[in-house]
Image (cartoon, rainbow, N blue to C red):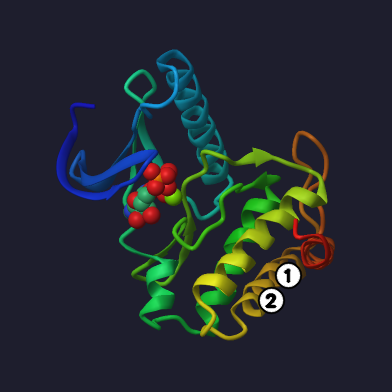
């Protein structure tokens, strides 16, 4: 990773440390998974590598399909490091808090999520921290450590449900946000038609995923989970 020149620390979380810098002169970030003290070291490094290889594999797959994820430029599995394209911008959580969003942006968020789902990838941790809004107002999805390849409605419905709950709990003043996200989510299928087959089958239609979201919401209301 010799071409990396380190800049400032962007994020210090429980799982990962993210630093900005340059790679071959281009704006980049380095994401390094942190060892977590409370687990057995062997198990810890096993899980760390598993989540990291998962993140790398699915991010590369999506980038190749033209989906809105950062390009991965270099990896070091033993050191648990990834160097990727830096998305200049801010997480959606900050955009919503500072009221810099508009309808068009929330529609774009829905379209970006649908791009993942059309490629049979379930994000697995769809929070407003993991959606980056670039300075030119594109919505990128990051942090695919818990992502899976999926063909069942349920996983996709849960992705939408997680985001919906976060929008309700953390941004209650942003009215109608989820409706706009869902508008973008179904818009893409209207434009592109049915999703193409992926290796495990056909990803479900947007309309069916949105129906499943409705069922999940009812289930949660009546049974609390
Ligand atoms: N490619 C990128 N370009 C710009 N900023 C990024 C990029 N990747 C990550 N970041 C910044 O770093 C933050 C954390 O990254 P990420 O979500 O991948 O880590 P994490 O797995 O959630 O870490 P933890 O679980 O420890 O909080 C993001 O919310 C974002 O602000
Ligand atoms: Mg994250």
**Residue at image point 79% right, 50% down:** 154
Q: Are marks 2 and 1 in contact (CB under 8 Å)?
A: yes
Q: What element does badge 2 sit on?
A: helix
List the residue tagged with mark 2. Answer: 183
Look at the image and tell me whether residue 29 can be seen.
Answer: yes
Q: Position of residue 85 (x, y in %)?
A: 34, 47
Q: Position of residue 39 (x, y in %)?
A: 44, 23
For mark 2, does the 10 Å Cα neighbourhood hold few (<14), some (14 to 19), or many (20 or more) residues? some
List the residue tagged with mark 1. Answer: 186
Q: What element does badge 1 sit on?
A: helix
> Between residues 64 and 217, which one lies in front from this camera angle?
217
Say left or right for 122 vs 41. right
Q: Does mark 1 have its CB less than 8 Å from ligand 2?
A: no
Q: Position of residue 149 (x, y in %)?
A: 69, 38
**Residue at image point 77% right, 62% down:** 220
> Between residues 194 and 208, which one lies in front from this camera angle?
208
């Amino acid at each position: 990773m010799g071409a990396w020149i380190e800049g400032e620390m962007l994020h210090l979380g429980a799982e990962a440390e993210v630093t900005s810098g340059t790679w071959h002169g281009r704006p980049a970030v380095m994401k390094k998974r942190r060892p977590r003290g409370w687990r057995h070291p062997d198990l810890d490094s096993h899980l760390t590598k598993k989540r990291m290889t998962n993140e790398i594999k699915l991010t590369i797959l999506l980038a190749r399909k033209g989906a809105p994820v950062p390009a991965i430029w270099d990896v070091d599995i033993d050191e648990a490091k990834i160097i990727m394209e830096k998305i200049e911008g801010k997480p959606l959580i900050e955009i919503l808090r500072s009221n810099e969003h508009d309808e068009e942006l929330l529609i774009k968020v829905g379209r970006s999520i649908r791009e993942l789902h059309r490629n049979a990838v379930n994000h697995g941790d769809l929070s407003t921290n993991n959606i980056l809004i670039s300075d030119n107002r594109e919505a990128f999805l990051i942090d695919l450590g818990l992502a899976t390849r999926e063909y069942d409605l349920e996983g996709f419905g849960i992705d939408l449900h997680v985001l919906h709950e976060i929008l309700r709990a953390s941004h209650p003043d942003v009215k109608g946000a989820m409706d706009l996200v869902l508008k973008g989510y179904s818009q893409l299928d209207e434009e592109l038609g049915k999703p193409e087959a992926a290796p495990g089958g056909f990803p479900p239609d947007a309309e069916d995923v949105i129906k499943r979201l409705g069922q999940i919401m009812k289930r949660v209301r009546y049974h609390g989970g």
